[in-house]
Every structure is written in C-alpha cells, then in structure tokens.
Amino acid sequence: MGNSYAGQLKTTRFEEVLHNSIEASLRSNNLVPRPIFSQLYLEAEQQLEGRRSGSRADNEEEEEEGEGGLESNSPANPYQMHPPPEGCCTADGFCQAGKDLRLVSISNEHIDVPAGFLLVGAKSPSLPGHLLVCAVDKRFLPDDNGHNALLGFSGNCVGCGKKGFCYFTEFSNHINLKLTTQPKKQKHLKYYLVRNAHGTLTKGPLICWKGSEFRSRQASASTCSSSLFQPVENSGPLATFPSEPVPEANPSMVMGAQQAGPASDHPSLAAALGSSVFNGKDSPKHQQLVKSNLVALPRPSALGILPNSGPPKKRHKGWSPESPSATDGGYPQGGGNRAKYETAGMSCVPQVGLVGPASATFPVVASGEPVSVPDNLLKICKAKPVIFKGHGNFPYLCGNLNDVVVSPLLYTCYQNSQSISRAYEQYGASTIQPISEEMQLLLTVYYLVQLAADQVPLMEDLEQIFMRSWRESHLTEIRQYQQAPPQPFPPAPSTVAPVTSAQLPWLAGLAASSCNDSVHIIECTYSLAEGLSEMFRLLIEGKLTKTNYVVIICACRNSAIESCIAVTGKYQARILSESLLTPAEYQKEVNYELVTGKVDSLGAFFSTLCPEGDIDILLDKFYQENQGHISSSLAASSVTKPASLDVSGLPTCTSYNLEPHRIRPFQLAVAQKLLSHVCSIADSSTQNLDLGSFEKVDFLICIPPSEVTYQQTLFHVWHSGVLLELGLEKEHMTKQKVEQYVLKLDAEAQTKFKAFLQNSFQNPHTLFVLIHDHAHWDLVSSAVHNLYSQSDTSVGLVDRLLNCREVKEAPNIVTLHVTSFPYALQTQHTLISPYNEIHWPASYNNGVDLYHENKKYFGLSEFIESTLSGHSLPLLRYDSSFEAMVTALGKRFPRLHSAVIRTFVLVQHYAAAMMAVSGLSQMKNYTSVETLEITQNLINSSKQCPCGHGLMVLLRVPCSPLAAVAYERLSHVRERLALEEHFEIILGNPSSGITIGKHFVKQLKMWQKIDDAEWRPQTYLELEGLPCILIFSGMDPHGESLPRSLRYCDLRLINSSCLVRTALEQELGLAAYFVSNEVPLEKGTVNEALESDAEKLSSTDNEDEELVMEGSTSEKRSPMKRERSCSHDSASSSLSSKASSSALCGESSAQPVGPSQGEQARSPQPCGPSEEVTAPGDKQRLRVSQGSQSVISRHSPGLIPQPDSCLKTSQRSIQVSVTSSSSQLFSSGSSSSPTVPTSGTFIPQASQCSMTKACRQPPIVFLPKLVYDMVTSTDSSGLPKAASLLPSHSVMWASSFRPLLSKMMTSTEQSLYYRQWTVPRPSHMDYSNRSEGRMDRFHPRRLLLGGPPQIGKTGAYLQFLSILSRMLIRLTEVDVYDEEEININLREESDWHYLQLSDPWPDLELFKKMPFDYIIHDPKYEDASLICSHHQSIKSEDRGMVRKPEDLYVRRNTARMRLSKFAAYNTYHHCEQCHQYMGFHPRYQLYESTLHAFAFSYSMLGEEIQLHFIIPKSKEHHFVFSQPGGQLESMRLPLVTDKSHEYIKSPTFTPTTGRHEHGLFNLYHAMDGASHLHVLVVKEYEMAIYKKYWPNHIMLVLPSIFNSAGVGAAHFLIKELSYHNLELERNRQEELGIKPQDIWPFIVISDDSCVMWNMVDVDYAGERSREFAWSERNVSLKHIMQHIEASPNITHYALIGMRKWSSKTRTSEVREPFSRCHVHDFIILNVDLTQNVQYNQNRFTCDDVDFNLRVHSAGLLLCRFNRFSIMKKQIAVGGHRSFHITSKVSDNPVAIVPAQYICAPDSKHTFLAAPAQLLLEKFLQYHSHHFFPLSLKNYNHPVLSVDCYLNLGSQISVCYVSSRPHSLNISSSDLMFSGLLLYLCDSFVGASFLKKFHFLKGATLCVICQDRNSLRQTVVRLELEDEWQFRLRDEFQTANAKEDRPLFFLTGRHI
C-alpha cells in the first residue's frame, strides 16, 4: 500500500486479502459496520496521509452522523431514590435509625451474626474512604469460584438490629447508601469482613461476583436461537479470524455455549457483554441485553475519528497540528492531579496515604504472588516508573517501593468509559453495550503509539477516544431507535467480529510494531505479576532505554483480561509521577530536598561547567578588578541622568504618566448588568430581596491572604470614592477607615467577619453586599478543614465564613462572587443560579465595537493568536535550550524534583546572562538566548530614558523556598557585578509586603511626585517604571495586578505537571494587559535593500516583527514556524564574526551592535516625515516630524531607543542601520563608540523611554515547553487544548460521555456545560449541596461575576455599589410636586382674619364670619380661569403666560423627597410589616374575595344604579350582610361619639384609572398600622388587573357605562353611594337605639398620588404675638385624620381639606391656621350636609373647583387646615393621561389639535373617538377666546358662568353664580360682564334670573345643550333673542359621531 508498514503486512496471503477487503469497505458509503482493522489501523493511516496533503480529513461519516443529535447535552437521568421517611437519620455512614455502620467505628464492637450469615463491607459513593458493615445471608453470596449465588437478597442491619430485608434496594435505602444508580448487590457489596488476631474486624478478600454473573448470562445466551447470527462465512475474508479455535484455557465458557452457534466460539462475546461488571461498575441489565440482540456487540471504534490516529511515518515533533498535546499527564479525571485520597472510592483502590512523593505505591488489590521491585531501579532507570493499573486484579508489590509509583487513574478512566451514558438510553437502546475491555486496551495502545517523544499522555484525550469509538460503533443502532420505536428483536446489523482476548496481545503487538519500540508489549500467561517481573528485569538490564511505555497484558485466565501500563520514559515518568503529588506534597518534597542538602550535588555540577572554575570565583575576580571605576561605565547613566536633567530645567520623561482613576465604559456596563440582576431578584415573586426596605448600602470585600492584593484593593476602594458616595465615611478618610471594608481571609478574619455579621443584624434597613473577590481560591469545605488545619489555618475559611447559616439566612446580605475563573463554582451542586451569573461582555459583536474604549484588552486568546502563522510577533514562547538542559539534568539527577532542577538552571542562566552583559563575554555560552535578551533589556532599559525608567521582569517561582533561593542567588550576583543601582530584585511573597532599596524608593517618589517621607510602595502597580526583577512566589497568584512597565513574564518555572484549566489560565493571566488603541499596531516599514543581509544573519525564526492585530495584511518578513529550532548557535557565530568588538553579541538578538561605517554608508536611510524608524530588535516606532528624520538617522545613531523586546536574532539591527550608543558600554574597556551628540534634543524624549512601548505592547511570556504545546495546540473545532482540561482541581467530570466544549461557546454556554458535566469533589464546599430540592438548591441572594483577569472587575463592582446605592436612595425618594401657591397677590383683602393663631381646631362661630376666598390657589390650576369676586381688581400682568397643553405636565416643578416611615406606597413596596395588609399572607389566598352587587336608585339619573363591590375575606368585617343569603346590605359606619384611637372613622375612597402598579394604595405605613377602611374605585374594564395587584383591597367597580367617563363620574358615584349607605346605616342602627345624627357622616376622597402628609409646628414668641417661628415635619395620615375627626362641631363643616406642600411656603400661608377656600386632592366630605349638592358626573377636569363653588353657594362651610399639608407624587402614567383623543376614521395616529374638537353641525368633519364632554372642556380651555373675544385678558369684565365652573383658559376670568334659591352669590350689581356661558342649564335658570346681570356691548353668549332641539327650546324659554343676536352659522357641535351623543353650542352677540 505504499506506506511504512508494507514490509510488516504483506507477509502472507491472509493479510493481503484482509487489506484489500478493508480498502473496499472503506471506499463504500453504506453503514455496514466496518471490519476491525479498517478502524484501528488503515483508516488512521489514511487520515495521516490526508493531513500531510493539507486537508482536514476528519471522518466525514462521523461528522455527518454525529450531527444527528446523538450527543445529547441533557444531563443523565439520575436514579430516583425514594425519599427517606420523615424524621429518620440520613447521615452518611449511619442507618436510618441513626446507628453507626462504618467499619472504622465498630471494628472492635461485638456484632451478633445469625447462623448462615456473613459480615460483608458495602461501599457508599458518598463515603469513599469507608466500608459499611452489613450482615448478609451467605446463600445470596457467591462461593469461592464465583458461582452459585442465589438471585435476590437477604440481610440484616448490624446497627439497629433490624432484620429481614428481602430487597437490596430497600436495604441500601436503610443504610443510607444514597445511590445515583440502580442499587445492585454485586456493585456495592465489595469485601468479606474478617476478624484479625486481635479480634478487630478488618477488610478481607474481595467478594468474587463474576462467576455467577457469567453463568446467568451464558444460560440466557444459550436459549437464543442460532438464527440470530449470520453464518460466519458471509463475512468474507474476515471469516478466518473469528473461526480460530478457542483456547482450552477457558473452562468457564463450556456450559451451554455450543448451542449458540458459530459465534459462541468467540471468547469475546461473553467478554464484551460482561466486561463492565467485572470492574465493579454498572452496566445494562444483561439478560435483556442478550435476549434482545446478541450481536449488537460494540464495534471497536474507528481510530480515524481521532485527530491523529495512527503512528506517523517519521517520529518528528508535533507531527500534526492537532496532536493530543503533551500535558501534565496528570490524568485530571481521577485525581485532579491532587488529592489522591479522593480517588480511593473505586472498588479496587485502597486508601492512599498522604505522605511522601511515592505515596501511591501501596498495593492495589492483590492476587497471587507479590512482585519485588529491584533495589537499584531508580539509579539504573534515571526515573521512577509510573504504573497505571488497568483491567483486572493488580498484584502486590514489595521491596523497593520508593522507586515506583502506582496510580489507579487509568483504571478509573476505563471504569468511567464503561458506564454507558444514560442520555442514549432514552432511545430504549438496551442493546447498546459499553466498549469492551479489549477494545479499550487496544485503543490505549494506539494512543500511546502515536504520542511524540516529548508528549505526555493525557487522560482527557483517552476518554474522548473511548467516547468517539463507542458512539461511532453504535451509530446504526442509535439511529434505528431514533427512527422507529424499539422492538423486542430489532433486526441485527451485519456481524462484526469483536476483538477477543486471545487476539488482543497479537493486535497490540502489531500496533506497537511501528513505533520503534517506544511502546513495548509484554504478554503473560497467568497473571500480571509475571509481566511486571519481566518488565523490571528488562529495565534493570537496560533493554527498555528507548521505551516510553510498557503495556502488560494477561489475557487468558477466565477470559477476563488483566492489564496495566507502565510509563518508563524518563521524561514522561518524571512528569506523571510529579503530577500525582498534591500541592502540599509538592511543597513538602521541595522543602525536603532543600533542607537535606540534596540540591548541593546540583550546585557542584554547575561549578564544573564553567571553564575558569567556579562562577563565584569569577564573580569575585570581576568585583575586585572593577571596584574602583564602576561609575564610569553603567552606573553613571541611570543614576545621574535624572538629577542633571531636573537641575537644568529640561523636560524630563513624558512617557511616565500614572493614569487617573476613571471608570471605563465596559465597567459601567457590567455594573449596570449587576444592578439589573439584583433588581430582578427583588422583582421576582419569591420575596427574597426587598429593595424597598433598604435605605443605604454597606459592603465587605473578602480577598485571599495576600498583602499586595490587600493593599491594592484598599487603594481601589480609596480612589473610587465609593465610601463617600455610599455615605459610609466623611470627607476626611483615613486608611484605617478604609481597612474596615476589606477583609483579608487569614487567621484574624473571623473576628472582623463576626463584626460584619453583627452589623448586618443590627441594621436591617441597610443592604450589605458581601463581595468575595478571587472567588475560585480556597473552595475547600469546612468539613474537611481538619485535614489541613495543621498546615494552614486559612484553608476552608471561605466556606466557614461566607457559607455560614447567618449569611445564607440574612435577608439583607447579597453575596457577590467575583472571579476570572468561575469554573469551580459552576458544577452540578453550585449554590449560584445560572440566572444570577454575570459575564463580562465581549467587546465586539458581529464586528461592531460595542463599547468604545481607547484601550484594547490583551488576554489569553490574544496571546495564543499571536503565535498563529498570520501574526508576526509571537508573544508566547518557550526556550528550547533551557528545556534541553533541564531534561539532561533530570536524567542525571533522577531523585531531585524537576521544580528544583528547573529553578537552579534558570537562576544559573540569569546569573550567567548578567555576567555576560557586564562584560564577562565567556559566560554567554552558559545561558540561553532568551534569558540573555531579557537581562540585557532589563539592564539597558533605564539608560534609554532621561529619568531612568526601566522595565519589569516577572520571574514566577511558585514554590516559596525556591523563590528565596533564587532571590538570594540573583542578589548576590547583582551585588558582585555592581549592578545594585541599575535594577532592583524584589521577592514577592503573598504573606508579606514589598521591600525595595532606598535608592529605588527615592526614584519612585520623584517620578510619582510623592512628598511623604514615610512612603513605601505597597502594590506592584506602584513599581511603575522601576527596572526590576520581581520574583513572584506563592502556589497561586491571588489577583495581584502588575504595572504597565512589565515587559517579560517568565513563567518557565510554573508547575507544568499540574495542568487544570484554572491553574493554567491564572498563571497566564498575570500577563494580561491593556494596550493603547490609539496607536495603530501595524508592522513597521523595513528597508528592502537590507532584507538579504538580514536573512543571512538570521538562522532562528524569532525575528522581531511588529505586533499585528487581527486583520493586518502586511506581509511577513521571514517564515515564522510554530516550532522553534533548537540551535541558536549559528546565529551567535555569525553575529560574533560580524561584530567581534562587542562582548555581547554572542547569542544576543536584542542587543545588536552597530554596523561598521561602511555598512552605514551603504544602507539607504528612510527619508520623509511619514516613514518610521524601527529601533533595533524593538516593536517601538519612532515618529519624527518636520522632515528631519533622515538627518537624525545619519548623524545621531545613539539616540534611537534601546531594544526592549524579546526577540532572538539581530536581523532588525541591520535592517535599520542605527544603533545605541550604550551598546559598547558592555565591553568593559571598549571606548570605540561615538559619543552622544547634543542634537539629541530633536527627538521626542518620550520615545527614548521603555514606558512609551509599555502602553502599546503586551508583555512577552515564556512558558515551559509542555505548557506551550498545551496552550497553542487546538482540537478539531479550533478550541485551544487547554480549554478542554478539567476546569479546576476541586471538581471532577460527571461522566466521560460528555460532549466536547466547542470554540463558539459563549461564557453562558460554557457555564451551562460545566454545570451539567462537572461535580464537586468531596473536599469542595458545594459537595454537600446536593440533597436539597432542585430549585431550592440555589441561594437566592448570590451572584457570580466572571471576567478575564486584570480587565477591571474591581472597578466594575465598586461602580455597582455606587449605582446600587443611588438606586436605593432613588427607591426611598420620590418626586413630589413642589410649586408655590398661585394668585397669592389676588387674595381677598378682607379686614377679617382668623386671629386665634394657636387654635388646634377652628372655632365654628369665628369661622362662619370669615369670607370665602373664590380665588384658586392650587398650582395645578395655573392655566385655569380666574374666578372673580367683588373684592378684586385684577391687572393683566398678574396672570402668567399661557402654556401649551403638552407643557402642563412636563414643566411642573418637582422636588425629590426621601420617603418617610409614614408614606403611602405603590405595588413595588414589600416589607415584612405590610405583607398581611397587602394580602401576601398565607392565611389569605389570592382568590379569597367575593363579588357583591349593590343597587340604589337615584332620581336625577332616573334609573337604578348598580355597583359591584369586591370584598376580600379579610375585609368582610367592615360590611353588613343579610342573614341568611349573605347579600351585601351596607358598609358599617362608626358613631360621632366614638373616641377610640385604634382606627380611622372615615372610609377612604380613591378613584383611580391606569395606575394599578403605580397608584399609592398601600396606606399601611401612612396610617401607622391603624385600622381603616379603604376602597379603590375602579372602572369595570380595569377590575381584573387591579384585583391582581391589590388582592387584599376592597374594590368599588363602576358600571360599564362609566368606562369612558372622567373623574367627575367617580366622585359623583362615591358621594351618592356614601349618602345612600349613610341612610341605610341610620336605619340599621336606629333599631339598635342610636340616633340618626350620631352616625359618622364623613368620607375621605383621596387622589391616588398622595404620598406623604406634613404638619407645621409653630413656636410663638409671646402670647397672641403675630411673630412666630415654624417648622414642618412629616406625620402619619392617622395623626392628621384623628386630629381632624376630633374637631369640635365637625359635623357643621361640609368640606375639610389641607394645604398643598411646597418648599417655598411663606410664613403668611401658615400664620392663619384655617382658611375658608377651595380644597383639592384629599378632602373630607360630609355627605349628610352636602346631600343636595352633587358633583357633575360628566366632568373630566376642574370638577373639584366646580363642586367647591356649589358647596359654598349652598351656604356650607369649606375649611382648609393650613397647618397640615399634603405631598403629591409625580406619576407619569394613568390618571388624566389615560384619555387620548384620536380620530375614529384613520388608523394612523395623526395629532389632532384642540381647534378641531368642535365643528359645524352636519359637516363632513372627521369624527373623533372621545366623549363629547372631554372635547368641550379641552376646546374651551384652549380656544374659548373664539367664543368670548371681548373677555380676553379683560379680567375686570369676566364671563358670567351660571351654575357651573368651566375652565376657559388663563386669559379669561369667570364669575360663578348659582341659580338656586337662597344660594350665596357675589354681589354683581356693579359688574359689567363680557360674556355669558349657559351650560346644560336646568329649570332654575329663568329669563328673570338673567335679567339681573349687565353685559358690555358686543359681549358674547354661548349656550351648550345635549341636542339641537333643546338648544332651540332653551333660547325660547330664556327669551334670549330679546338681548342677544344669533346667526345660523354660529351653531357648533363637538366633533363626535351621532352615536356618541355630541354636545351642541349656539353663540350670539349682545345687542
């Protein structure tokens, strides 16, 4: 076939035929299951061929069918356990009676075991480390051969003694196994328990279940008809394979196998069916499985669906871009690379100890002879082999156990892959079986074969292989079940032969034959023990030196295979064994090596490398030689420059500007998202957060115990101003004050947190926001805290504090978790609802920039993008020479942990690089190019800047002891090289602050203009511009931010073996950065003439190229490969030869040497101001204007800024022929460099400083090779490999049958993915949050904010606190109308005043003498017509300007007022006190209200009025019902004589429309809890919505004829109903002996916008003095009502009201306590006195003024209490706004102006859809001057208005007269009227009545009637034609249709 395997395959005719067959089947398109070889072998090869030809040869069929919805994302249906009985114990390890069953607890107790019973140990999934003791009848257990167990179960509980459990399900419930799968005895009864010599009960041998299971399966198999099987011959060339004779060593196959036909010769038939049970995991019900479809055995998976199936032809690195990358091999599946004790829950894995690196070396279930580990294994092998237990039993190991590591992770992986995902069982596909053990092992071998030499196996890869294999092998079956209902015997697919255990070793050997012995197969006959012994022998003999993996297979006994895999490759074994250590063990091991001096051998080795002896000797020699004249070289430049420049007054560096603290658009958007989530919690019906009850916001920020993070957070809080904004602190804040709000989670945290809880308890009206920053840190459950407590008190603290009961239950604490890595909080058991997650928004959506920012965030994805081939400057790199050295030393020192080796090598490299830069050129060969470049740029950076600004190098050393070693060593080298003044070395430790030298503190203070003598930098951000190496230690970063001067992020020492997504992303997050958007990041222009020179010079592929954003099309200068060449030496040598004058040019790329003069002359210079000079090895562009660039380029080469980037070659240095004057300073004696010319001032100084680049380029990151491969490789969907890792150490995958994450997933989708597919480990704080109900599991007041690292989450949540506080204040504030009373200067100038200023109530006799003030003073009537009385003389300038109708509501003045505790509320208010009042009380269900009809006749309407009451059950006591029948009879009224202070006597009626949400109907607080009767008066069509929002309020529903009526109708009906009710009550109570006049006659009619009530307190200076002081305060409505109701002679007043509140109230307004004038908005109406005075039911506006005038003219008293005032809330919806005047004809809403509201009768005018009365009132308000031209602004000649007040607009005044006999009217004898308005006049108006009034000549008349007929009759009846002239064209009507009953007008002129 033309491939590398040809020689191996074409040996016999059989193989040839077989291969032809496979090729044929591959080419066919049908779905016949393909033969095994095609899947395992050739297809992989073909894919490889496809890959090489550049195509993505994904398995198309897989793609096609995989799309068909097979990969169900829905979670597996868990086994539904019956809920335990009420009150029983449900604790793990105890039975339901509460007795302890754990073996550790009762091992020494006497247990009574009945005859015939045995004690066995049961495993509980929730207690992985424990066995539960049970007594089981031995008849139901298998015998020693695994046979003869009876079906069923019989057992007793040894705890409580309960006997006779006949079902294992029942028994498992009793002993609280809490299973998520179907309970089976085979699965959960694991061990016999035996007593040892001391009588203690201990774990005995494993219960051997397999024999009996096997028997039952075979028995059922034998009953099947052989016709189910295709004859073997049909399968073509494959027939040879399955018909091989069955080995005789298979005794258990004999029984009943022959009847089953030819296929039963297949040992794998049974093996495939039973495989899953052998390993103690669940599998489908086997009997059914076999009955329904024997042949649906799993087809072995096609390896073709793997990204790289099949071994490559050549073993070259990274042979496929999608190879499953080298990774930690930590197998995150089982142990998460950490806490191994959690993996011990597997049936065959004992508890693993926690001590020492080789802790996993205890025997895992042994069988047979122990295997001895050779003594000198590590010495010979140079690495500890890691042995992964596979299938079957694993033998004991004895002897030198320290030299091997045994892990159960692979076993776990196999087990997980065996459990079929329940997602597929919904198809009823019971025939679908798990992947067979043989298949698993074979796939594992294939996976290992195709791993490259520098790759490490990764458990996730293997799981995905199994998953795909299983899915592909069942595509047909699943599709069948999708299309048709499952049948008992579905048609069998064509036979495919499964792998048998006999063929397995041969196939595995065949697979491994191509890999040059990197995988070695050992086949054993009897047990794994012989294979292990053989492997150890080969290792000792050195025969496995090229072998990385040894696969040991024992495949003949009992037909159940046994296997294990040993990793013997030195590189792989080291990484895997180290990945099995927990972080604590890792630290312990490193400490141990440092303390015991094991590392000394490493130091000794390094000292032998240096040609001139020990490095230290070299350093001392250098130090002595240079001691005298250091200042002449390096020191001078950075130390003296700043001083000299400052003194001379020249501008210093302009690049250094600390950014002001401001909020970015993104942060504001996130803050608003947070706020809207909090509001949605409050708005939900669950009542979990009552925002309305909070007055202010308080907060506490919890952060990890890092001093720098602590100081950084304090800094953010201080500068955000949030404390001032929340009102928590005053102007002068101290640091101590700020510290109260930030809690470092360390040993002292508990006290501070208790104070916070106490504070929240004492302030229920403060909303406390508990912010848990860096929330992925320390998720350890407080339950397992004791495991750690010795080492670290802060472990488990988060759970103990933030998850305590007080926090969970406090209704005023909202918890906000903030993290960049939320994955561990997104599990199946999380406390945070998915609806309460807030994700940082994407900056672009469909290419649109959503939030314009001047900075672009550069995070992980952008770093990865920079490594792709379309980008010129890779920001992620690895150092191959460093890796090579580490690997070599790893082999030399196998006993040292690689972290130690890596640290020592890197420190050595840095030391050598510093020496090389300082002039010891011979040292350049002892460092790597990368390190040399970093060091060089670090030392040179400060000299390019006039102020000495430099760059920061971050050196990450996670292990603190190693960090200390690195710090000491580098500080020593720096001191010896006299570089102390050039850069600082800082040891960053989480537990301590920052310490830097005095010289650098002084520099920082100068740069940052700080005068404080005591100042020291406390955060890394304050190190901006300081040239330094920051050695950053601590196992995890804790959220520390780094300054913009960070140029290199050296992560070569991160623990690359512990790869989980969180750990990896958080390390890379250190480099996250904001890049300025203002500078375009395109590639620099380069001189093409020099390109060829550059190419000659460059032999590496890391040239310096400009950083390119996506979409840049500029071409690349030289090829950029993903892999880096290992040899940097050619570059060095060519450089050295070119520029030997410098000691530095060895391997340096970033510090080029200037070309010779000749080259400078030859090279064309860039000319013209638009071009750019690119600095050597630098991404910086230097822009020079005024065309002087070429001059500068030629004559002042020394001024081009120093290189600051991380590039490995000096290609650019020749391309741009300028260089730095300081480049020669490094060769100690060299003085050949030209001096700096004075013309340097031409170049902008900002460009010389490394800080200039800082804002334009992210830092460059160096990674370990392993991590680099992991981060940069992608899977088939383009998703970075790192994203598919286990998300966090503290969680595990719920199933290996999970779909892959895909590249297109949003944060929300990722969250849902993790919530479905991950579960917390037992040590995770959410682990216990699973027993609760599905919805209750989420905590209602818990939010999660996730966003990339360093993007500004702190600023966002502080902004959130600000806007939350503003919103709460806004919620407790209300806009109330704040308008001065109008027409004050027109007040009646009367001699009579109410002189008794201190009277609490009006004196009736005095009050009667007061004149009535006709003038309207309510500001809402500013546009209304003035009412004249005989006392006024009105000047036109007294009246305001006329306003447009729409301005009326827009321009009214309001004031924002804080709601008092006596306010009325709308439906949004919820608080504990008024729950019952509002009807949200459990006793009152929403539907518990009844509808009652109430009818009364009213003569004026001439018909009976039918009203409906809706009366809630809770309010029925206010009413009287007939007995029997329950008919509503009346509303109870109190007596005038009642003096109780418990209730309000007057019923309150509130007419309302359109304000079901916003109307202020909750009077509970306003009434101060007092009992009162409140009735909402609603229109019929709004009844349902009001009832929904106000279920506990009484509703009075108006008849449907009033649906379009105005407020007049409601007032009219309220008054009439109340009078009728008064009569009924008088009659009812008269029978009880009560006088009619004693029944309380008052009602309150209140607007629905009355929000608060105030009272004026007056302080008199002296008795009866007119001078007094007064103040206003908020009081309850109860207080006001009870005060008014207690007035003496109250029944003599008809109307009582109060003043409208205004902030500008004058003393004169409150001086007199009572006024006799108009009352509005909130009136107390005496329905008895006003019996004959009606509201006008037709009115829409001014009906209260009209009614006031009628009441006064009837001789009744109106009293306004001036010392009480009412505040009205501005409500923008409903009320008068609900009336819209629209056209009836056209659909388009054309604006209709008031002039169109009337028209000529019978005209073709557009009819309007509005009541006639509304049109009339609106027309008269705006256009009455058409009718009364003479009246316009003629205030002394008003319009005479008879019996009604209509608003004719503010320009016209009216005079109201009543035609009723004995009515009070003003004396009008001396008034000349300019018009007469007769509106629907009744019979009281007669011709003689009108004759009393005098009109001006030309005065106009307007008569308004219901129809044209009555219009004529009125004219005749009133003899109007005598004095008034009418014309036909003077008749009008309102613009209504006939059916809407228009009103008709007639106008005329006075003759």
Image: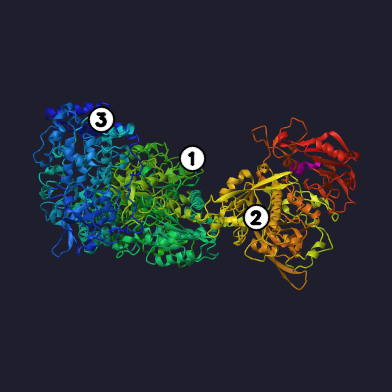
Q: What residue is pinned by disc 2?
A: 1531
Query: Sequence order check: which comes first, mark 2 or mark 1?
Result: 1
- Look at discs 2 and 3 and give the one toward the viewer: 2
Q: Nearer the viewer, mark 1 or mark 3?
A: 3
1122, above or below 611, in the image:
above
Mark 2 is on which residue type? Answer: Met
Residue that numbered label 1 is attached to: 848
Disc 2/disc 3 C-alpha distance (Å): 79 Å
| Residue segment shown in magenta | 1817-1825
Q: Is residue 300 magenta?
A: no
Please tell me which of labels 1 and 3 falls first in the chain. 3
Q: Nearer the viewer, mark 2 or mark 1?
A: 2
Image location of residue 1054, percent across then percent down: 30, 53
User: Tag 2's secondary structure?
Assistant: strand
Q: Which residue is mark 3?
A: 491
Q: Is residue 1277 above or below residue 381?
A: above
Label 2 to label 1: alpha-carbon separation: 65 Å
Could you say which is closer to the camera, residue 1917 or residue 9?
Answer: 1917
Give the amino acid at mark 1. Answer: Val
Q: CA distance from mark 1 to mark 3?
A: 55 Å
Say what amino acid the circle numbered 3 marks: Pro
Say which label, 2 or 3, has the lower sequence index.
3
